[in-house]
Image: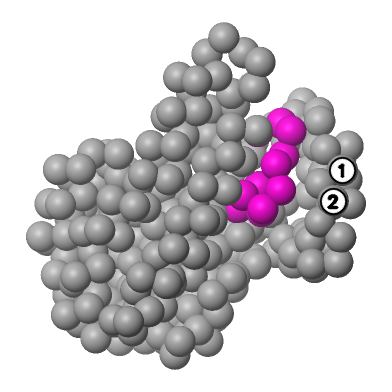
Amino acid sequence: MNGVPVEGKVVLVTGANRGIGKALAIKALECGAKKVYATARDESKLAEVKAIDSARVVTLTLDVTNSDQVKAAAAAATDVDIVINNAGMGTGAQLLADDVVEKSKLEMDANFYGPMRMVVAFAPILKANGGGAIANVLSVAGLVNFPFAPTYSTSKAAGHSLTQGQRTVLAGQNTLVCGIYPGPIDTDMTAGMTVEKGSTEELANYVFDGIANGTEEIYTDAMAIQLAQGLKADAKAVEKSIAAQFQNVRD
């Protein structure tokens, strides 16, 4: 699949109010995007992104777990070329806890059903606009289960498989579908974790380079790249190594 350089394109980023999503929205502007739809559940929290370039940034209220809001966003952003499904959540649920089912449902709704809703709504728009690209922000935790976040890992594994399916279905309309696989990134979600973390700025660079080059699996930091290489060489060894290293990683 051909790449989609961001210069001159219209980009939509979910969860753009902070962390990875904010960095992606800013980087899209720096790379010359014609317009950036910055979305969040609370639109007022997008003021900083809007202030960077009020002429090119359009803010929208969007909770990806709300089907009506997803449809409304699609109706508002009919000129979009690149959709970045970044919004997600982690609850810290543990597998033997009494509340594990309820918490894991919340993660699945955001991390699996959210990108599913978005692609159903935006695929026809991308087709009408020539194909474009979809990029789903996943995680290396979707490739091997991290014991400190087992249900989050499970939801990202579901998102990984979903991304593969979307890639197959959308190939016929010339839509590039990318999976983005960060290791631990320095955001609110990883606060208190005593592991080496990548930066959101580095991640954003990898993402837009990958989309421009037509890269289907985008690994965004040294740990992610090393883990992907390890999985190709010996997946079982990586599983055991992650299980041993990431039991207790919070202060």
**Crowdedness near tag 2: few (<14), some (14–19) or many (≥20) residues, C-alpha within 10 Å:** few
Image vertical order of residue 39 relative to residue 207, above or below: above
> Residue at 50% of width from left, 28% of height from top?
104
Q: Residue at x 75, y 29 (%)?
A: 250
Q: Are marks 2 and 1 in contact (CB under 8 Å)?
A: yes
The answer to whether residue 29 of the structure is visible from this angle is no
The residue wearing badge 1 is: 240
Q: Nearer the viewer, mark 2 or mark 1?
A: 2
- What is the quadrant of residue 38 in the picture? bottom left
Determine if residue 107 is in view: yes
Q: Residue 21's spot in the image, x, y percent?
A: 44, 55
* Residue 145, x across and y down, in percent: 70, 42
Report the side of 113 relative to 224 (left or right): left
Residue lying at 52% horizontally and 56% vertically, measured from the top left: 161
Which is nearer the eye, 73 or 162? 162
Q: Please state, as top left, top right, bottom left or bottom right, where the N terminus lies in the image.
A: bottom left
Q: Amino acid at mark 2?
A: Lys
Whether the magenta-drawn stretch holds residue 179 is answered as: no
User: Which element is circle 2 on?
Assistant: helix
Tally the numbered discs: 2
Residue at (12% x, 51% y) in the render: 72
Q: Secondary structure at mark 1?
A: helix
Q: Position of residue 25 (x, y in %)?
A: 39, 64
Residue 148 counted in the magenta span: yes
Left or right: residue 73 versus residue 50 is left
The residue that label 2 is drawn on is: 236
Amino acid of disc 1: Lys
* Magenta-drawn segment: 139-149
- In this rendering, position of residue 198 left or right of residue 157: right
